[in-house]
Amino acid sequence: MDDLDGLERDLRTAVRGGVDFSVTARALNTMDASNYRRVPLGVLTPRDGDDVAAALEICRRYAVPVVGRGGGTSIAGQATGTGLVVDFTRHMNGLVALDPEARTAVVQPGLVLDRLQEAAAPHGLRFGPDPSTHSRCTLGGMIGNNSCGSHSVAWGTTADSVSALDVLTSDGAAHRLGQGWQGAPDGLRALVERESATVRTGFAPYADLPRRISGYAVDALLPEHGTDLARFLCGTEGTLGLVTRATVRLVEAPPAKALAVLAYADESAAAEAAAGLLPYGPLTVEGMAADLVPAGSGLPKGGAWLFVETGGATPAEARAAAERIVRAADVVDSLVVADPVGQRALWRIREDASGTATRMPDGSEAWPGWEDCAVPPARLGPYLRDFRSLLTEHGLRGTPYGHFGDGCIHVRIDFDLLTGPGVARFRRFSEDLAALVVAHGGSLSGEHGDGQARAELLPTMYGTELVGLFERVKGVWDPADLLNPGTLVRPARLDENLRFAPLPREPVDVVFGYPHDGGDFSAAVRRCVGVAKCRIQEGGSGSGVMCPSFRATGGDETHSTRGRARLLHEMLAGEVVTDGWRSTEVRDALDLCLSCKGCKSDCPVGVDMATYKAEFLHHHYAGRRRPAAHYTMGRLPRWLRLVAATRTAALVNSLASVRPLAALGKRLGGVAAEREIPRVARTTFSAGWRAGGRRGGDGPRVALWPDTFTEHLSPQVGHAAVRVLEAAGIVPLPVPRARGRVCCGLTYVSTGQLDRARAVLKRTVEVMEPVLDAGVPVVVLEPSCAAALRSDLAELLPGDPRARLLAERVVTFAEALERLAPDWDPPRVDRPVVGQTHCHQHAVLGDAADRRLRERAGLVGELSGGCCGLAGNFGFEDGHYEVSVACAEERLLPAVRSAGAGDVVLADGFSCRTQLEQLGDRAGRHIAEVLAEGL
């Protein structure tokens, strides 16, 4: 564009919302959840419809395209554009009104679906459609794509649930759309009436197809269909107008639900059975195969499953309906779940499939593109067999899953989108599959819209005459072709604008091993496909962690896992972010990453932003001066060992208690002024253990790891652990000291000092050789150190077999008790517990053994999820205090404040205990301390 500065200046003058043409804003919006990438000029976050109208008028004057954007979870490329992106999620995200009597709600386009569901639930109501991205997708995006979700067999598509729309067209004119022609732009009625025969003929083959989403629903404007302009606009993908407000219909939610899980030998059998279950009135009929189900999922034995949900006035009635379906179905095995918690756990497996499907069982990549074709439900079995044959013919693999009851499947396919021959095969397969879908009477899109992925092939489905009519309809609404051009009408080719095209083809020189990505940092970054589970803004009470900084910053995409992955992608691409590892934009986005590793487990595709951050910081500061905190807290083990060696702990503590000296030290050390400096133990854990003498015994031996935090800051935890282990008949032994100190390298890793981390870890595995030769487990009391040894050690020393062996030997305190003393009965504490599962334990180690230990000790209750917000050095660093507190206030501090006086506050991590000590009024304790007290 010739006058970009003028466009930005005029927008800033005309609107009250945000106008951002920065590198960061543009990089964050280059992609949605599709295979496509288009670089915008800038981003508008409007405050109201007046802002949108003003922006449209200015963009029309400058001939700049406009694309509306909600959660950015579209998988066909329709939420990307080369002009101005209008992001409705920041301000226009409200629930304007809810009328329980009329069963309607008035919403703004940026409202996340789950927020509407939460508001409607107390009235026994809900919005019918519910895509698997319901926790972050917006109503505006659902209207644009005519989204459906798992309950469409009961409540239909978004178009079935919309009664009126307030829309702005590219000329800035406002239109109120409902039933009838009122609000239609000039010329639309005449065009439809003139072409009514073409419309009737073109749509007739799909009259009974429940998931016909492709193209413009011009047939909704026929008189026999009620001339419904609101229904027509659903699914137009922002190409005709931008929705600023919508009136939607709500449905009565069953008071009780049950879930029947039906197991079949394979997906074909499940597909054949799905249509036969519809007469029983289920709320859902979802299908998925074993390839997408994690081990230990609790599903009944089989190769594929149907998830069939039933409703009722009472739990007994819902369960009876589910059991009727089980009796009617010819299944290998089955399971009926009436417990809401159990149902949610099973539904999470299905909802995460859009992410887990992006990796084949052998770890290779798979991509969207043919994500949601739909055929008549009775044709699904034959269609899937032909689909499998077509995959084989093209040498491709994919695992279908999805809405079997509606004949709609999702699939990620292992397309090679990085090479010319691979892209050519992608095109040939797409053309062949379009013909196959149409041969089965299906729609190219059954849920997510055509976008760039399928619009080029619409003539295969509708013929050139009807597609030509779509173009004329677009011309009536948007004569300047300003709104989302290249999408749906006159589309770009399906093999253009692929987001992988600008990425480097040679592996990037990195320090970590990235074993799950073939050692390729680009492949690691490509893991983020935009599913956006990290954008969930309400933490709730679940066990998940990801992404605390996104929630703490009020939903700023820059501070989501996806946002950071997008910036790293653009850093590698080099077009928008042009200064590579030296990028200040990437550095600033990563600055508020807590390195909690929540994304490593909570992200369906296993993005590990903590590792990517460490890698980036290593390169960013190579040969340059680092922030002061990297020298103080990043090298904490070194300073604490120096204090212990010089026996100056008392002096250090005394100096830290003098406020002016503490303030000066914190300022020089990059520590937040609001933080108190933790006290250093006068006697280290190891010294105290030696002085107290060690018991022998003939029980199983373990090496007790002297992590920095236990050794120097909370030795009481180590002493408590020794008492408990010995009481259980386990013999704890110190690690060797003769050849040097051991360290997990955590503080060096989290600050990106990877050369130092590798040196520390090399020394550590050398020191640990006798322990490894002895074959004993290594008990690590600090969860973050255990996680570093389990995950980072082998990745930083990929060629050292000792590193992998040590990682395999690491066990948590609870795991050691369970494995080595299975018959030991811990002391009965019999008290409620509150607190938080350490984020690294949640993400890397797992807490199943801890849960069982608590249960055996009578420690009743659930620990919350999330992150305490201190997260090692993060919460201590200058500039992070407010975010750190916000993270703690999300779940941890409210849980502790609401606890009874006799409740046990558990916090196994030193960071968690420190955060409680400094922000709360209750001290947290390691479970070893609680059990030792009960001995």
Image (tube, rainbow, N blue to C red):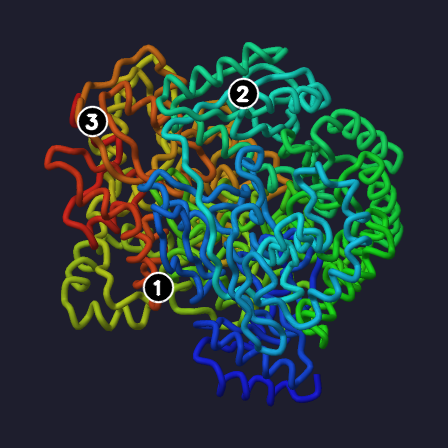
| Residue 270 found in image quarter | top right
* Mark 3 closeness class: few <14, some 14–19, many ≥20 residues within 10 Å: some
Across and down, in percent, residue 256 comes to 38, 27
N-term mark: 2 or 1: 2
Q: Which residue matches tag 3?
A: 932
Q: CA distance from mark 3 to mark 1?
A: 35 Å
Identity, as a three-letter code, of the amino acid under mark 3: Ala
Q: Is residue 862 left or right of residue 702?
A: left
Q: CA distance from mark 2 to mark 1?
A: 46 Å
Q: Which residue matches tag 2?
A: 261
Q: Which residue matches tag 1?
A: 880
Image quarter hosting the C terminus:
top left
N-term mark: 2 or 3: 2
Q: Residue at x 71, y 71 (%)?
A: 187
Across and down, in percent, residue 445 comes to 71, 46
**Residue 67, label in figure:** none
Q: Nearer the viewer, residue 71 or 769?
A: 71
Q: Is residue 230 left or right of residue 256?
A: right
Image quarter hosting the N terminus:
bottom right
Can residue 859 be seen here? The reply is: yes
Q: CA distance from mark 2 to mark 3?
A: 44 Å
Secondary-structure class at tag 1: loop
* Mark 2 closeness class: few <14, some 14–19, many ≥20 residues within 10 Å: many
N-term mark: 3 or 1: 1
Across and down, in percent, residue 184 comes to 62, 67
Secondary-structure class at tag 3: helix
Q: Is residue 768 left or right of residue 906?
A: right
